[in-house]
């Protein structure tokens, strides 16, 4: 069985410039836990999930530092702090989404998709054909496929 056989074809998507509030409404209205982020050509450029939104509520991890000759020496990468703050305070999808997205081709086997999900600890994987989004596979889709065998 292939990805195209079990994927959901009517995929709700968002754009990088959409707001976090738009995403929350879509997640609740459609009872889904994540949405692909696409560009004008319907290519996947990110994914935004409940986990990304929950991240906004976590405690900020401030870097440890020490002083030397009246100078502050940070022990953690300041870029990491900047990323944390941007993600926690983000208003637009682009500021909160996960940009490194695992995608599969529509011809990929269901076993490969299931393996990717467990190894990468993701709940859904966008399905592409020639780099264009054509569907999404969730864990539930895989379970339904196995149940129908």
Image (tube, rainbow, N blue to C red):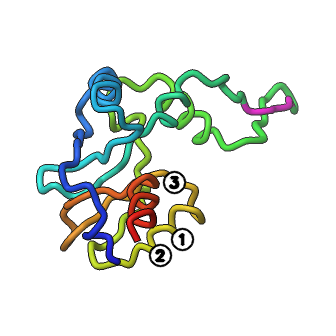
Image quarter of the C terminus: bottom left
Residue that badge 1 annotates = 115
Q: Quadrant of residue 90?
A: top left
Q: Give the Cα separation between the discs numbered 2 and 1.
A: 6 Å
Mark 3 residue element: loop
Q: Main secondary structure of the magenta part?
A: strand
| Tag 1 near tag 3, CB within 8 Å | no
Number of residues whose C-alpha sits closer than 10 Å to that of mark 1, classed few (under 14), some (14–19) or many (20 or more): few
| Tag 2 near tag 1, CB within 8 Å | yes
Image quarter of the N terminus: bottom left
Residue 140 highlighted magenta (yes or no): no
Q: Give the Cα separation between the discs numbered 2 and 3.
A: 15 Å
Q: Is residue 40 left or right of residue 86?
A: left
- Of 110 and 65, nearer the camera is 110
Q: Give the Cα separation between the discs numbered 1 and 3.
A: 10 Å
Q: Residue at x 29, y 64 (%)?
A: 127
Q: Earlier in the sequence, mark 2 or mark 3?
A: 2
- Label annotation for residue 91: none
Q: Residue at x 53, y 37 (%)?
A: 83
Expressed as whole percent of the image width and height from the top left, the position of residue 87 reads 48, 32
Q: Is residue 53 left or right of residue 69?
A: left
Mark 1 residue element: helix
Expressed as whole percent of the image width and height from the top left, the position of residue 80 reads 60, 41
Q: From which residue to which does the magenta span run?
A: 63-67
Residue 64 highlighted magenta (yes or no): yes
- Label annotation for residue 122: 3
Q: Residue at x 80, y 32 (%)?
A: 64
- Label annotation for residue 111: 2
């Amino acid at each position: 069985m292939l990805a195209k056989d079990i994927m959901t074809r009517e995929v709700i998507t968002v754009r990088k410039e959409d707001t976090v509030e738009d995403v929350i409404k879509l997640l609740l209205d459609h009872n889904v836990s994540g949405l692909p982020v696409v560009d004008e050509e319907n290519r996947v450029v990110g994914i935004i999930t409940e986990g990304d939104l929950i991240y906004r509520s976590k405690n900020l991890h401030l870097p440890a530092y020490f002083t030397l000759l009246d100078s502050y020496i940070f022990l953690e990468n300041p870029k990491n702090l900047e990323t944390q703050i941007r993600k926690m305070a983000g208003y637009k999808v682009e500021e909160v989404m996960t940009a490194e997205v695992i995608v599969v081709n529509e011809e990929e086997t269901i076993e490969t998709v299931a393996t990717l999900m467990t190894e990468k600890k993701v709940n859904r994987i966008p399905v592409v054909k020639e780099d264009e989004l054509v569907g999404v596979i969730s864990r539930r889709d895989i379970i339904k496929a196995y149940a129908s065998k």
